Image: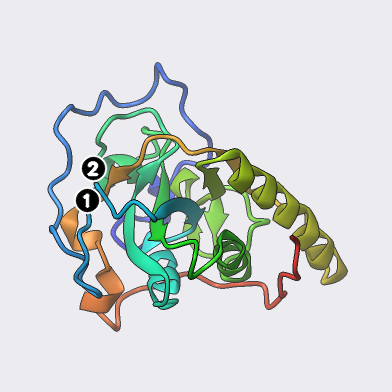
């Protein structure tokens, strides 16, 4: 995003001892999703499942998923896969928390599949760039899939293998996406939530590879 200069973006993850201490207080956020009005915080309806992805600037990433509409209960942006509890945006941008900018997707698996969400993930960013996404540079812009079940883990790994082959055909390098069990999710500040719905002309640095992800299940 545009709030900090590129020189401030760190390209290596801190160790736990180097990370900022954070705080115990959680981030206040709006009670309802700006786009569909559903409750932002759990408990969610019993039939819902959760997915989490990091694919660059989380403003644009979140929009890709709420636009799916059918089967999506809520989307939320936040920070995950770092060390600092309840970090602020400024702290994450400093590179001293280890967190990634992520989007959490709460969805109804009877209406929309996890495979569909993975396809959106792979096709809407470049997963070969390491600690950056386009002009957005830093550890918070790394590509990541954070799984909530063994089934999600298997499908994520399978999709990564299949998409890697397609990327190679198109001349791209190796995928750098981390695929790990979902760490704790910390909501980002309220103004970040559904940012591009509130600010339709706002910044979005997301860009895909123009490579389609084939079926993998």
Q: In whole angstroms, how far apart are the C-alphas of marks 2 and 1?
A: 18 Å
Q: SS class of the residue under badge 1?
A: loop
Q: SS class of the residue under badge 2?
A: loop
Q: Position of residue 70 (x, y in %)?
A: 42, 77
Q: How many residues crowd mark 1 within 10 Å: few (<14), some (14–19), many (20+)? A: some
* Mark 2 or 1, nearer chain start: 1
Q: How many residues crowd mark 2 within 10 Å: few (<14), some (14–19), many (20+)? A: many
Q: Is residue 194 left or right of residue 177?
A: left
Q: Check the image and report above or below for 38 versus 81.
A: below
Image quarter where the N terminus lies is bottom left
Question: Image quadrant of residue 119?
Answer: bottom right
Q: Position of residue 172 (x, y in %)?
A: 78, 64
- Residue 178 showing in the rendered view: no
Question: Image quadrant of residue 106?
Answer: bottom left
Q: Check the image and report above or below for 194 versus 46.
A: below
Read off the residue under disc 1. Answer: 41
Read off the residue under disc 2. Answer: 88
Whether label 2 touches label 1, CB < 8 Å: no
Q: Is residue 88 left or right of residue 114?
A: left
Q: Position of residue 180 (x, y in %)?
A: 58, 37
Depth check, front residue: 69 or 130: 69
Q: Check the image and report above or below for 164 versus 65.
A: above
């Amino acid at each position: 995003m545009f709030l900090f200069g590129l020189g401030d973006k760190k390209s290596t993850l801190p160790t736990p001892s180097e990370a900022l201490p954070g705080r115990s207080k959680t981030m206040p956020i709006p009670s309802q999703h700006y786009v569909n009005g559903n409750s932002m915080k759990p408990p969610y309806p019993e039939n819902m499942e959760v997915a989490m992805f990091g694919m660059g600037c989380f403003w644009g990433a979140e929009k890709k998923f709420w636009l799916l509409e059918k089967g999506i209960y809520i989307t939320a942006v936040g920070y995950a896969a770092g060390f600092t509890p309840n970090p602020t945006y400024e702290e994450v941008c400093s590179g001293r928390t280890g967190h990634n900018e992520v989007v959490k997707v709460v969805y109804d698996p009877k209406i929309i599949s996890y495979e569909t969400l993975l396809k959106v993930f792979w096709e809407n960013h470049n997963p070969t760039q390491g600690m950056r996404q386009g002009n957005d540079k830093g550890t918070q812009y790394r590509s990541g899939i954070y799984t909530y079940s063994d089934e999600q883990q298997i499908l994520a790994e399978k999709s990564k293998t299949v998409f890697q082959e397609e990327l190679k055909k198109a001349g791209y390098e190796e995928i750098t996406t981390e695929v790990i069990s979902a760490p704790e999710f910390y909501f980002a500040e309220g103004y970040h939530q559904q940012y591009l719905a509130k600010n339709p002309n706002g910044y979005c640095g997301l860009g895909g590879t123009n490579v389609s992800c084939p079926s993998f299940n």
